[in-house]
Image: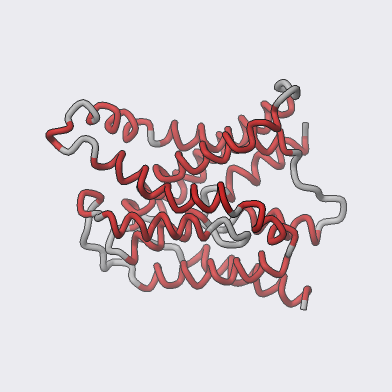
Amino acid sequence: MIESVILGVIQGLTEFLPVSSSGHLVLAQKFLSGFGGPAAAFDVMLHGGTLAAVLIYFRKDLFGIVRDLGRPREGGWRLPALLVFGSIPAGVVGVFFSHALEPLFSSPVVASVGLLATACILLGAWAVRGKSRLSLADLTVWSVFLIGAAQALAIVPGISRSGSTIAMGMFLGLPGKEAARFSFLLSIPAISGALLLESGALAGQGFPLHYLTGALVAGLVGIGAIAFLMKLLDRENLLPFALYCLALGSLSLAFLV
């Protein structure tokens, strides 16, 4: 039960803060004696908890999207269509290339380099802060494709999904909070798709209490992590996360090389 709570906290924090949950998992397995990744079925439950966190935090946005679907003449289908289109790159990578990329998840060097890449991405976004001029209504198909491609790139351990998509949105001219809003809405199809691909792991497992506890903790911590990040993005301040990824990536490489 204690391990379930700890893994739930880690999942809830690193899934949403721009520091790469996969990178932390790979490095923890390398440097922490006796640490192992969660069982496949438990991993599915943890992702279910973080999906619930997004659905709860952005419930007003989701209700608005559903409501606007009944207003096609007023452009009510535009945002849902963009979210579906932006999910295509990650879907293609997940379905066709996930097995080929599996060896990366056993390489702490790849995870360390990925964290350094995340640091550079976040530093770039921090450098363009305050230069936003667009809203979600101004997003084009091309800009959504670029944000989706950034999400697909984040399958590499160490590269943060939230960090890369928020940064790409800011590079394209979105304010930090609007970029984060689109990023987290875009995570719903991505996490849901991953759950579907991994759902076979739950067959015959049932729902043990410690699995449910881990999912609940991941969800609650995830809501707090989203709220914390959105507050920081009032000032578009991604610098602390960039410095953290830079320090962790550098230190781990120093021990590995």
Instruction: Name the residue at 22% across, 58% down.
Output: 134
Residue 7 lies in quadrant: top right
Q: Is residue 224 left or right of residue 62?
A: right
Image quarter hosting the N terminus:
top right
Residue 142 lies in quadrant: bottom left
Instruction: Name the residue at 55% across, 70% down.
Output: 117
Q: Position of residue 125 (x, y in %)?
A: 40, 68
Does residue 208 appear in the picture of this structure? no
Residue in the foreground of this view, choosing between 231 and 209: 209
Height in image: 215 above or below 249? above
Q: Position of residue 184 (x, y in %)?
A: 42, 45
Height in image: 244 above or below 213? below
Does residue 249 appear in the picture of this structure? yes
Q: How many marks?
A: 0
Which residue is farthest right? 34
Height in image: 216 above or below 227? above
Residue in the foreground of this view, choosing between 116 and 148: 148
Image quarter hosting the C terminus:
bottom right
Instruction: Name the residue at 34% across, 32% down.
Output: 62
Height in image: 78 above or below 134? above
Q: Position of residue 172 (x, y in %)?
A: 30, 64
